[in-house]
Amino acid sequence: MESVGLDLLVEELRDTFESGKTRDFSWRKAQLKSLLKLLEEKEEDIFMALYKDLGKHHCEVFRDEVGVLIKSVNYALDNLKTWMAAKKVYVPLAAIPSSAEMVPEPLGVVLLFSSWNFPIGLSLEPIIGAISAGNAVVLKPSEIAPASSEFLAKNIPLYLDNKAVKVIQGGKRVGEQLLELKWDKIFFTGSNRVARTIMSAAAKHLTPVALELGGKCPAIIDSLSGSRDRKVAIDRVVGGKWGPCCGQACIGIDYLLVEEKFAPVVIELLKATIKRFYTKREYISKIVNMQHFQRLSNLLKDPAVAESIVCGGSIDSETLFIEPTILVNPPLDSDIMTEEIFGPLLPIITLKKIDDCIRFLRGRPKPLAIYAFTNNEKFRKRLIEETSSGCIAFNDAVIQYACDTIAFGGVGQSGFGQYHGKFSFELFSHSKPVLRRSFLTEFSFRYPPWNERKLKFMRLLYRFDYFGLVLLILGLKR
């Protein structure tokens, strides 16, 4: 699409927003219900699109994308009126008599870039937040998942308000053209490399940006006692590594940290679980395209890395399939340990004692998630207090993505800006302070001419909040 056409498209969206249409509660509710209808009526088409793009089994598609989105839309519908309501806030003695509240208002026209690994989920999840907040939206799906991109471009106009929500297909050039325009917010899911381009372009217009990136998410496995705990932990590790899109997930497990003495047990349990879960090739996704297939294949070509393989390692370039592969102690300076893997390769790094993982993690970029499998409460507390990550989950992996009541997002190189549930609404809103005062009372101490009596009064006023104390006693201040 030519840049002139994009200008007109954005102008139409801005006219829609300026009309006040998208601010209305009934419009937001109707759009969310239509999105729910799309997910329910077009489920089979979504299954087919994701099978074409990634070879995903329809059960995996429903678990990770359709089902998660249905849950998210219903959660937004249940809470939208509460999110939109102004929130009264306490006003200190220095400002009485007055009242104040925080009023959420939509930002305007927002641009969303989605990723190819969950091309439906990562497109519609931020749309839920943007619509709930009352914005007009442009979605740019990833061209790397063409069937999903085509599905979105064809069906979103049939279900959502085409004057307020638009889908723009295309490759790198279209993305560049979109970034030349002025937006009220840009939301991007993808790689750090592209994120730098997004931020650079946004800076020209001082456009706020939310970046959902990735990083090397570790899983720490303590020496769990009891065969059941170990089995459940390994089931969840395998699910958190190979379950979401064959490891092509920003929140997927990138590598394991295990004590040396416990590593043989972990390896054998992993092998058995992989064999039990993936009895058919169709149960695991393919690599998205030849470029990513070659990238992953090249990681295994390093002789020192190849020597560390203890399970799997076979590849099929015709079907873009790479077998679930386990490696033990590949060189820490190899590409497989310095770059995000984003594929079905799982390095295991052994440590003398599990507490050493804290020093190991602190010497590396902050990941999107840390997963720790342990029953040791003291160890949990240390991980929370002494490491930094987008989130930390104990005794499970990836499941945090489905929790609407907690924020999802990164920190440092793994991104910034949080969404899901109310956090999505807040991400695409401005919380505007509104202060109301009457003309009935006026205090001369606010104005010159100055004297020591006024200064003394102001010292008391600002130092001791008697009004707040009274409200606290009456139970009116929270």
Image (cartoon, grey):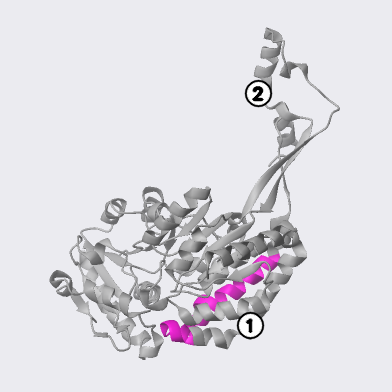
Residue closest to the far bottom: 280
Can you tell which mark lies on residue 40? 1
Callout 1 secondary element? helix
Q: Nearer the viewer, residue 233 or 426?
A: 426
Q: Position of residue 5 (x, y in %)?
A: 58, 67
**Residue 262 position by quadrant:** bottom left
Inspect this view and state whether residue 327 appears. Answer: yes
Q: What's drawn in magenta, residue-wise?
A: 50-78
Q: Residues within 10 Å of mark 2 (few under 14, many from 20)?
A: few
The quadrant of the picture occupied by the C terminus is: top right
Q: Tell me the amino acid under the disc marked 2.
A: Tyr
Q: Position of residue 464 (x, y in %)?
A: 66, 24
User: Residue at (72%, 19%) from the top-left corner?
Assistant: 446
Q: Nearer the viewer, residue 22 or 358?
A: 22
Can you tell which mark lies on residue 161? none
Q: Position of residue 58 (x, y in %)?
A: 49, 86
User: Residue at (19%, 60%) from the top-left corner?
Assistant: 333
Left or right position of 272 against 232: left
Q: Position of residue 401 (x, y in %)?
A: 50, 67
Q: Tell me the amino acid under the disc marked 1.
A: Glu
Left or right position of 335 against 289: left
Q: Which residue is mark 2?
A: 462
